[in-house]
Amino acid sequence: MQRVKLDATDSTNAYLKKLMATEKVQDFTVVTANNQLSGRGQRGAQWESEAGKNLTFSVLRYFENFRIQEQFALNIIASLAVYKTLKKLFIPNLYVKWPNDIMSGNNKICGILIENNLKNDLIKSSIIGIGLNVNQMDFGKLNKASSLKRITGRTIDLDEVLTAILDNLKVLFEEFTPGKVHGIREQYESFLFRKDKPSTFRDSNSKLVTGYIRGITEEGKLVVEFEDAIFKEFGFKELELLH
Ligand code: BTN
């Protein structure tokens, strides 16, 4: 595992991408930034992180015969690696909010941005970017964001948490190689945020709808049950869980 430690960069995902365009980068290269100046989040959002307080890092993986239809396995593996690490640190009320936010109670403590490089119907490589709020105490207007320190009152060693996440990632990737991803879905579903609870969503027409999360499909779509036992499946851009 090759490690690139940066003091400051715009985005560790973007850094890895640029590096790959200029030189051969080894499988499992990990890029960390002490200060990520322009972190990127899902749905085109920004990921803000106070310098030196949190983990902002990206991991590169190459694959052979990894079909696009199975790409949600990456979301599951990344989420489980963080989930398992935080469980060992006794972080309470841990859940994975679909597709891959890590929550403690109603607070988001970690976001994951996975960027895949595709060829035909295969994923050739993937950059898994993880932002975990560790010791930051103030999140300004982001009232749903929290950190491990805010939750536990303890200052936590960044390197220890990073090493534990990377170890978990390695084990999960060994266990669930492409074509062998069944079984992890059930684990993921058992930690799914608001599963079987009445919840409010925003659909793709910005309409508010209520229903119950029942699980995910093989391809990682969210399964929601609405009134009259009507089940529907949603892709990431088709539904947003509000509360
Ligand atoms: C989200 O919106 O929840 C995803 C946030 C992902 C943030 C991480 S921090 C490291 C990596 N580099 C980025 O620019 N984004 C990801």
Image (tube, grey):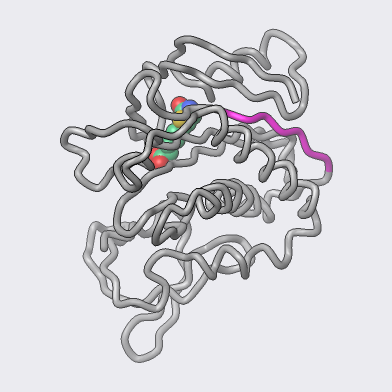
Q: Is residue 49 left or right of residue 165?
A: left
Is 109 left or right of 6, judged from the image as shown? left
**Residue 61 counted in the magenta span:** yes
| Residue projecting furthest to the bottom | 228
Image: magenta residue range: 58-64
Compared to 230, does 170 lie above or below?
above
Name the main secondary structure of what is drawn in magenta.
Answer: strand
What's the residue at 22%, 66% (across, down)?
208
Q: Give the number of callouts.
A: 0
Q: Which quarter of the figure is the N terminus placed in?
A: top right
Report the front residue among 39 and 104: 104
Q: Nearer the viewer, residue 159 or 55?
A: 159
Report whether residue 62 is seen: yes
**Position of residue 148 in the picture relative to residue 217 (left or right):** left
Instruction: Judge whether 7 appears above or below 16 on screen.
Output: above
Residue sitting at 19 percent across and 44 percent down? 143
Q: Quadrant of ligand 1?
A: top left
Residue drawn at 80 percent across, 47 percent down: 174
Residue 118, position in %: x, y?
Answer: 68, 36
- Image coordinates of residue 59 in percent, x first then y, are 63, 30
Q: Quadrant of residue 217?
A: bottom right
Q: Quadrant of residue 181?
A: bottom right
Asked whether residue 42 appears in the rendered view, the answer is no
